[in-house]
Amino acid sequence: MNYTFIKNLIILTGFQITWLSCFFGEYYHLHLVGVFVGIAYLIIFFICIKNKMQSFKICSFISIIGYFFDTTLAYFDLYIFKSSILFGFLPLWFLILWPCFATLFVSTFYFLKNKIFLSFFLGATLGPLTYYSGIYVEIVYSTNIYLTFSLMIIFWGTFLSSYSRIIDKFIKE
């Protein structure tokens, strides 16, 4: 197995463990579990990654955009969390979930380079499906599900396809 595959598998696994910790932590009212797991993952990620400053910039850029999008949905009461620990309009664990998700952009999503339609399709389907899982288990609800998911489809499709076009400006493999 090559180094890149193993690195991507570890990053993807670390993010998935963090996401599940945040998701089930919220579901079982263990709100800080995801925060602690995410912090541990980010520490391990930044210890192991070679280009720390580049990775930090990518994670910061992606996190700010994503957190702003989610905050906007919550601000307009389109996507409302039933969490007891909020930071602004979102659960506290979102502050750690976004940087953890952004680690995928450091190398895992490199396969999307210049694959605009695939990137749009994956973003427009997988992004909203992830949000829908929160509605399905009733840790969030939407006041207008059609508008909310239309915005998610547009945002995630555009976001991922745009990233696939400019990936070389971020990643120097």
Image (tube, grey):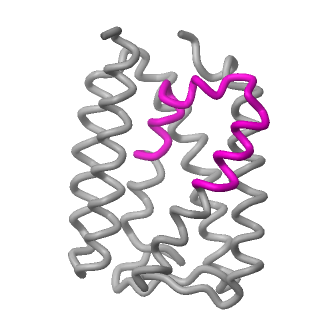
Q: Residue at x 46, y 80 (%)?
A: 136
Q: Is residue 24 magenta?
A: no
- Dividing the picture into quadrants, the one containing residue 160 is top right
Q: Residue at x 58, y 19 (%)?
A: 171
Q: Which SS type dominates the magenta stretch?
A: helix
Residue 142: percent from the left, percent from the top? Answer: 61, 85
The vertical placement of 158 against 76, above or below, is above
Residue 4: percent from the left, percent from the top? Answer: 40, 15
The vertical placement of 145 against 39, above or below, is below
Question: Which residue is nearer to you in this view: 6 or 33?
Answer: 6
Question: Which residue is nearer to you in this view: 71 or 115?
Answer: 115
Which residues are the magenta region?
Answer: 100-126
The vertical placement of 58 against 168, above or below, is below
Q: Is residue 107 magenta?
A: yes
Residue 15 lies left or right of residue 105; in this view the side is left
Residue 125 lies left or right of residue 104; in this view the side is right
Q: Quadrant of the N terminus?
A: top left
Q: Residue at x 35, y 33 (%)?
A: 11
Residue 161: percent from the left, percent from the top? Answer: 75, 38
Q: Residue at x 70, y 64 (%)?
A: 152
- Dividing the picture into quadrants, the one containing residue 170 is top right
